[in-house]
Amino acid sequence: MDLLTELTRTEHDPAVIAQVRALIEQAEKAKQLLAQNDAKLVQHDARLKEKDFKITALTLELAYYRRIRFGSKSEAFSGEQRDLFEETVDADLAAILAELEPPDSALDGAAPKRKRSGAGRQPLPPELERIEYRHEPASCQCDACGKALVLIGEDISEQLDVEPARFFVHRHIRPQYACRACECVTAAPVPPAIIDGGMAAPGLLAWVAVSKYTDHLPLYRIEQIGARQGVSLARSTLAEWIGKIGVALQPLNERLAELLRQRPCLHADETPVRQLDPGKGKTRHAYLWAYRSNNFDEGPPIVVFDYQTGRAGAHARVFLLGWQGQLMVDDYSGYKAMFATGITELACLAHVRRKFFDLHAANGSPIAAEALRRIGLLYAVEQHGSALAAPARLQLRQEQARPALAELHAWLLVAGKTVATGSGTAKAIDYTLRRWPALMRYADSGMLPIDNNPVENVIRPIAVGKKNWLFAGSERAGRRAAAIQTLLATAKLNGLEPLRWLTETLEKLPTCPNSQIDSLLPFAKSTRR
């Protein structure tokens, strides 16, 4: 029997009983609240244990990736590495044989650049083949009243489909005719081809090259794609094709480099790649140097990749030997020697912005935030002037960018005195001030770029592809890859579909004289010389 029941049986004041009842109800509520809090604490402890477990797992994973990134990389070849090395040797041998027996001539193709429409579902390209299916109602009579239905419109929907790597055979039949009088035999001649007597049509050769150098598929994966459809494409055969394609396309690569060096302003950057060192069963560093035309220049955009076994600035000097103009680069010291020979240095504002962005992301630095705001004003001016002609762009930069740059410079000088020497903020400010003359040069021209992003954008796909193809099998393989990637990347810059362009080019190459090589470059038809 509880206390409240005992009180109701006595003659106590009802008001006192009501107070006791209220106190008991409050105690019950407090008890329930404590129970709920206990349950929440148990759940909280469980979540903490779960988070601790996740942190431990992530710490171990981080240690694993750090070991891969910074640890020893001198492991012996795996089975897959040996296969990749063997396909490189086959490609190199085929390339050497092709160089010993060069073809008589040299290459083309084009496709219109499709403009991207607004947000949302994109319309399917109108040039794609349409296969129509008509879906009629089960009955032409109304289900409600039984009368005949009348066509009032059509609901049309489209689905995109694909036939991956559809293999087919071109069968060439050449009837042979004989003359009874003189016993001569006549037949249509066999047209010259990239690989005389080979079974690969230009479309197949182009597909293999684009798969390897644009889609970054190693040859063993291409071999597997063919095997799934019952087509035997031996890796050694694929490698021979790649080697011969590389030699055939080399004149175009050299011509693109020649045209690039005629431009007054260039971008330059480099990215590391791994190259096999077969004598030691290891890999070592090599570099893919990239040179790109300026977006404001007249003429089609060009990018040229130059494979070198090191990062010494001499490689850039050799590639640009005799060239004079403005060169947009990062702060790598390898470029510095060229600026004493008449080449004008342009500095990248995006690199400056990146340093302040990292600072702000790390600790919310108010100085970094202010620097980002001021740099944002400069990019806003560039965005406004991107569609203008050079004289109008120069006027805009003089009126808006020049004052903003002067204010940024003055602010940096003051801010640099308020931060600790050697701090991250001080280093970012010192970097900016050290490069200031090169950073502000673009504002005195309507044709110079503000940053090095155009060349970094063409390098980015290759940096992603390195995770697939792992390394270059040899220096020759690296140079071949650079040459083919030069052509395919330039085709993409000019709005051409690489596979279509390369297919048409390989068809025309065997009969195209060297004097017409410019007609074969991967430019849109309206921009070809």
Image (spheres, helix red, strand yellow):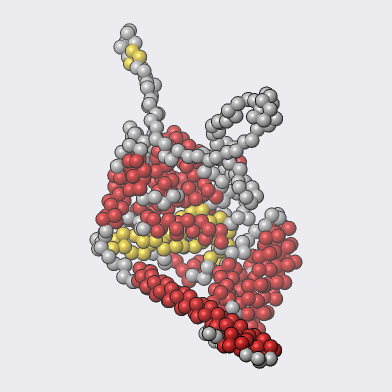
Give 516 or 69, whichever is nearer the viewer: 69
Residue 85 left/right relative to 385 = left
Q: Residue at x 56, y 46 (%)?
A: 495
Kindly tell me whether residue 180 is visible in this rendering: yes
Taking the image as shown, residue 18 lies to the left or right of residue 127, namely right
- Quadrant for the C terminus, please: top right
- Residue 323, percent from left and from top: 52, 58
Residue 517 visible? The answer is no
- Which residue: 69% across, 74% down? 406
Q: Taking 50 as reference, is 504 above or below it?
A: above
Residue at 33% across / 48% down in the picture? 220
In the rendered structure, the answer to whether residue 317 lies left or right of residue 115 reads left
In the rendered image, residue 486, in percent from the top left (x then y), is placed at 47, 51
- Name the outermost residue toward the top: 181
- Residue in the picture at 35% in, 48% down: 221
> Can you say whether 74 is above or below 368 in the image?
above
- Residue 217: percent from the left, percent from the top? 39, 50
Task: Give the answer, above or below, for where 276 lies relative to 521.
Answer: below
In the figure, is residue 315 to the left or right of 445?
A: left
